Image (cartoon, rainbow, N blue to C red):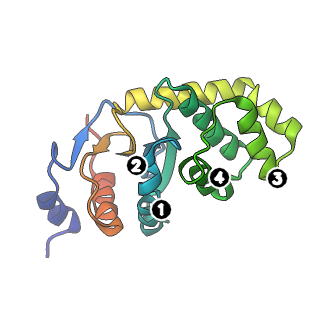
């Protein structure tokens, strides 16, 4: 009986299903990182697919997100929205609400006041939100998001990177297929 890794190796091809990248530092635990923007309509449509994939990987492979700003002001405000959601531990509560606001209600963030008002409407304290928005931590987080996207060689969103080393090119047709590819890549030895 062949180990699962051997079966997968025949199924997945470097350059077709994934490519090796210069890489980003990740934890020792297996992780798949989605690079996305709340402003990206394809990210919005793919979000349920990725959520289902994350559920299939739960307990084995950590699912993380990194928002991409791409130098666009509304996208940068969306990066800040993600930072605030993480800072106040409300990501599960607001993630879908932000996508809905932008793609179903046609109301992208265009000014910092809108961002502040959104988070206050989600039950957060206005002074705490203002302080977080104006903090050095917020500026550093946004710079870190941009650095991760550059190191991961992200050219479009949504993009998935496994263990900071493998950029997925072909995401599969089902969450199960994507989860299998992620599992395969998470077991590859890091390039020397």
The answer to whether the residues at label 1 and label 4 have Cβ atoms under 8 Å apart is: no
- The nearer-to-camera label among 2 and 3 is 2
Q: CA distance from mark 2 to mark 3?
A: 29 Å
Judge depth for marks 1 and 2 and give the one in front.
2
Residue at mark 1: 51
Q: How would you rate the neighbour count of disc 3 (Cα within 10 Å): few for under 14, some for 14-19, many for 20 or more?
A: few
- Image location of residue 192, percent across then percent down: 26, 34
Is label 4 or label 3 in front?
3
Kind of element beneath mark 2: helix
Q: Separation of disc 1 and disc 4 at Cα?
A: 13 Å
Q: Quadrant of residue 2?
A: bottom left
In 3D space, how far apart are the residues under numbered discs 4 and 3 (Cα atoms)? 13 Å
Q: Which residue is mark 2?
A: 42
Q: What kind of element bears circle 4?
A: helix
Q: Nearer the viewer, mark 1 or mark 3?
A: 3
Q: Secondary structure at mark 1?
A: helix
Mark positioned earlier in the residue sequence (4 or 2): 2
Q: Is residue 44 left or right of residue 189?
A: right
Q: Which residue is mark 4?
A: 91
Residue that appears at 43% across and 58% down: 50
User: Are the residues tagged 1 and 3 within 8 Å (C-beta)?
Assistant: no
Name the residue carrying label 3: 123
Residue in the picture at 87% in, 44% down: 125
Q: Judging from the image, what secondary structure is the residue with disc 3 in?
A: loop
């Amino acid at each position: 009986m062949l180990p699962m890794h051997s079966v997968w190796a025949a199924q997945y091809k470097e350059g077709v299903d994934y490519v090796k990248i210069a890489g980003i530092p990740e934890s020792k635990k297996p992780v798949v990182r989605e690079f996305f923007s709340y402003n990206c309509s394809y990210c919005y449509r793919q979000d349920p697919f990725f959520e289902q994939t994350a559920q299939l990987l739960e307990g084995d492979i950590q699912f993380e997100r990194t928002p991409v700003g791409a130098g666009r002001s509304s996208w940068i405000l969306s990066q800040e929205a993600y930072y605030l959601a993480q800072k106040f531990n409300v990501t599960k509560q607001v993630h879908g609400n932000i996508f809905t606001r932008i793609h179903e209600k046609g109301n992208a963030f265009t000014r910092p006041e809108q961002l502040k008002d959104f988070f206050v409407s989600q039950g957060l304290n206005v002074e705490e939100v203002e302080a977080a928005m104006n903090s050095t931590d917020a500026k550093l987080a946004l710079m870190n998001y941009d650095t991760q996207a550059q190191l991961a060689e992200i050219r479009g969103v949504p993009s998935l990177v496994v263990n900071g080393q493998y950029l997925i090119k072909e995401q599969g047709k089902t969450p199960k297929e994507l989860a299998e590819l992620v599992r395969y890549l998470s077991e590859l030895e890091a390039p020397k």
